[in-house]
Amino acid sequence: MIGPRLRTARLAQTPPWSLEELSALLEQQSGLELSAATLSKIERGLRSVYDFEVIAFCRLLKIDPSVLLGFTAERPPTVEATN
């Protein structure tokens, strides 16, 4: 779920960031060491993402976590009761 949204946010930067640039910036700004290959796996949905990684992505990309999680800030997710 997060991978395609991460890719969209990465490519929406001006100019668009490569996976190598995203990797380097993550390490510089948050100390998070994720290789370009690992980031590619995340974007393709082949690797899970930890909560602290979501936070680092959002801080670096200057986006709300709801963007990566597929929610909108105006309409938080709801939980439906099952009976």
Image: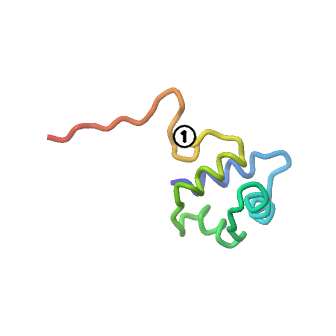
Percent from the top left, x then y, of residue 37?
A: 68, 73
**Outermost front residue:** 31
Camera-nearest residue between 46 and 50: 50
User: In the image, 29: left or right of 3?
Assistant: right
Residue underneath mark 1: 66
**Outermost right residue:** 15
Percent from the top left, x then y, of residue 8?
A: 67, 49
Quadrant in the rendering for residue 23:
bottom right
- x 50%, y 38%: residue: 71
- x 57%, y 43%: residue: 65
**Outermost left residue:** 83
Q: How many marks?
A: 1
Quadrant in the rendering for residue 4:
bottom right
- x 66%, y 65%: residue: 39
Badge 1 crowding class, 10 Å Cα cut-off, few under 14, some 14 to 19, many 20 or more, is some
Quadrant in the rendering for residue 31:
bottom right
User: In the image, 42: left or right of 30?
Assistant: left
Which secondary structure lies at badge 1?
helix
Q: Is residue 26 above or below residue 35?
A: above
Q: Is residue 71 above or below residue 7?
A: above
- x 41%, y 36%: residue: 77
Percent from the top left, x then y, of residue 29?
A: 76, 54
Q: Quadrant of the C terminus?
A: top left
Percent from the top left, x then y, of residue 20?
A: 79, 66
Q: How is the image coloured?
A: rainbow
User: Which amino acid, by three-letter code, is at mark 1?
Assistant: Ser
Q: Is residue 83 above or below residue 31?
A: above
